[in-house]
Amino acid sequence: MEGAYPLSAYYASKVLAELPFEQIYPIVFVCISYWIVGLRSSFLRFFVFVCIVSSSNFAASGLGMTISALVREIRTAAVMLNILMLSLCDASFSALLSFQIS
């Protein structure tokens, strides 16, 4: 196709254009929940927590884009995403429990 942008340019511009809007909700969530939960009141620890929540937000967004690119039907995509998320959560929690038990 002549005159069309390459896929990498489209994806990069999409991610950069949505970046500020994708970060508003996690930052608001962190600003409220960090102080309500009573975590340590240090700016460095607060900033690390913001970075962790932002990273998980980016990972979830990327996972959603990957699944939507691989599967054309919504029902199949929802099933795949549920199975993938359950297996990832199960793996991370079982690793956490194995460290606490031993």
Image: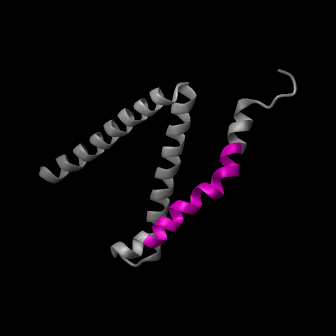
Residue 4 drawn at (x, y percent): 82, 28
Residue stretch rendered in magenta on the structure? 14-32
User: From where the camera sits, is residue 39 visible?
Assistant: no
Q: Residue furthest bottom?
A: 41
Q: Does residue 98 appear to the left or right of 29 in the view shown? A: left
Please name the residue shown 41% across and 69% down the image: 33
Frontmost residue, 59 versus 21: 21
Can the viewer see residue 100?
yes
Residue 100 locus on image (x, y percent): 17, 53
Which scheme is used to colour this image of the protein?
Answer: one colour
Q: Is residue 42 left or right of residue 92?
A: right
Q: How many marks?
A: 0
Give the image location of residue 86, x and y in percent. Answer: 33, 39
User: What residue lies at 46% left-to-right and 67% top-to-bottom?
Assistant: 30
Identified at 87% across, 27% down, the residue is 3
Is residue 41 shown in magenta? no
Whole-percent x, y for residue 99 in the image: 19, 50
**Viewer-closest of 73 and 35:** 73
Q: Residue furthest right?
A: 3
Which secondary structure class fits the magenta region best? helix
Most extreme residue toward the front is 75
Specify the farthest residue to the top.
1
**In this rendering, position of residue 93 left or right of residue 82:** left
The vertical placement of 31 against 14, above or below, is below
Q: Is residue 88 above or below residue 36?
A: above
Q: Quadrant of the N terminus?
A: top right
Residue at coordinates 54% horizontally, 61% vertically from top-left? 25
| 27 inside magenta stretch | yes
Q: Is residue 65 above or below residue 35?
A: above
